Amino acid sequence: MQDSKNKTQKPLLRISNLKQYFPLKTKGLYVKANDGITLDIYEGETLGLVGESGCGKSTLGRTLLQLYKQTDGRSMYYGRSLDDIAPKYVEKTIKDLDKNKKKLAELEQRRDAIEKEYESMPDGKEKYQKRNELDAARKAANDVFLDMTNILGGFSLAEDTKPVIEAFSGIYKLSAGLCKEDRKLEEAKLDLADAEFDLKKAKEAGKSTASAENKVTKAKRKVNEVQSRIDAIRKELTQAHAGIDEMRKKYKDNAEFQRLEGFRDDGIDLARLSYEEIRLLRSDLQMIFQDPYSSLNPRMTVGQIISEGLFAHNYFKKADERMQEYILKVMDDAGLQPYFVHRYPHQFSGGQRQRIGIARSLAVQPKFVVCDEAVSALDVSIQSQILNLLQDLKEQQHLTYMFITHDMSVVKYISDRIGVMYLGNLVELAGSQEIFDHPLHPYTEALMNAIPTTDVVNGKEMQILEGDIPSPVNPPSGCKFHTRCKYCTEICKHQIPEWKEAAPNHFVACHHILGDRR
Ligand code: SF4
């Protein structure tokens, strides 16, 4: 369910199955503000997020910046390397792996010893009993092995290690199947031995041998059946091992787990950082708010507002004279006159205040900026100035934006790609032009139709989406949009639509995408 805008573009953030639930006072109830979001955000792009208020778009922006503690899922950040932060969770993972490695080595040694003993024993009841011991030893080793793959999985493996993990878990399953069949073979052989003994006795006693012969035939057939199943599994196992060997050669390393660790994802899982660790990244991840007035301290001058972040992130020491020069540069970048530096927020217009907010956020040289309804409170004429400013700064400073808005015209203007959210989920994601030209989800279509237009030539008129957004505490079953969708059919009420790539780089979650409905 990854979006694949452009495989050559580097992801700055890779979000998988992000959940943000807020508990209610009633025990066990949650507001599911984000309910399993998977999304890549690429370096240098502007990703627009749209949806009605309450759809979870602002929560997603704040959760990515870890202003809320993420409930579940991963938010991998690639703007810095793991070594820059050296998070505690990585240290813990390595320790857990080391512990398990030792345990696995001991268990494998024990298993091999029992196996050797077992192989050398003659067929019979004692061997059968030894088999129990061998099965338990194999299971113990396999369980630790599986634990290790889980630990590594939690460690955020790089995409290209997935085949390795899959190959290992395939081997695990085949080995488990082989254990079962081996046991059946032991039983079938014992039954055959019993049947042959009975036949021998019948012959010696000169009795009729028909029934005993029949039993022997049946038992032989059973042994052959199980044996052929075992042969088939062994063949598959050989192939799977050969596959692993191939990968081993490819990665030029012999120790299985060292190789896996070498292929760990080098991103930082923001959701697993401690409060102190996330502070180290705070300057990388900034936010520009909707209401510039309430987000600016009225008792501070512009200069003080901008310097606050610079001190917090140790850009300058208090007495450093270069700071004033830097502040003036940042103000100039944001289109603010130098003499504004000693003025207070109330002395500015809405547009100028938003420029101060922008200067404050960009002064700490972030890599990723969430613009949350950044122009919604401004007059339309000022909106375009601020949008142009954001666009210019993005180019100059190589920024990546997540642009959250309910305004479809704004999102169209500023975004490279657009994600449409409904009740905590992404329902559609595509390039800006593509989504406006070919909206595939009925909700996107409804949002488009709700854009005020004077285009009477084409017979378009303003349409407002009917009905309220359902409660995110108890969202509707199946497709969450089904209570408001004019294309809803029975399947929509029960089955959650899959997130699929309906056209190149155009993702949608709907049972009846627009093309199908026509
Ligand atoms: S899945 Fe069904 S209810 Fe949901 S948006 Fe598609 S057509 Fe409408």
Image (cartoon, helix red, strand yellow):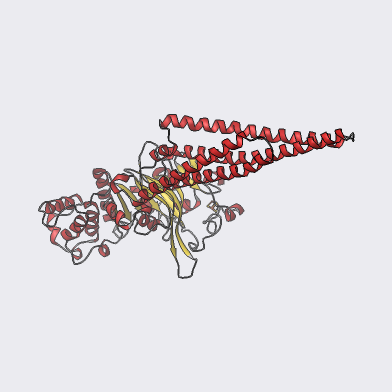
**Residue 172 horizontal side relative to residue 123, left or right:** left
**Residue 341 horizontal side relative to residue 274, left or right:** left
399 up-or-down from 380: above or below? above
Residue at the bottom extreme of this rendering:
25
Residue 323 location (% of width, % of height): 13, 53
Q: Nearer the viewer, residue 188 or 42?
A: 188
- Which of the 4 image quadrants contains residue 275? bottom left
Residue at 16% in and 53% down: 316
- Residue 79 appears anywhere in the view: no
- Residue 197 appears anywhere in the view: yes
Q: Nearer the viewer, residue 115 or 294?
A: 115
290 up-or-down from 95: above or below? below
Residue 487 location (% of width, % of height): 56, 52
**Residue 397 horizontal side relative to residue 20, left or right:** left
- Which of the 4 image quadrants contains residue 208? top right
**Residue 246 horizontal side relative to residue 401, left or right:** right
Residue 250 location (% of width, % of height): 43, 30
Q: Looking at the rendering, in which quadrant would you find the C terminus? A: top right
Residue 472 location (% of width, % of height): 48, 62
342 up-or-down from 455: above or below? below
Q: Nearer the viewer, residue 322 or 407?
A: 322
Q: How many marks?
A: 0
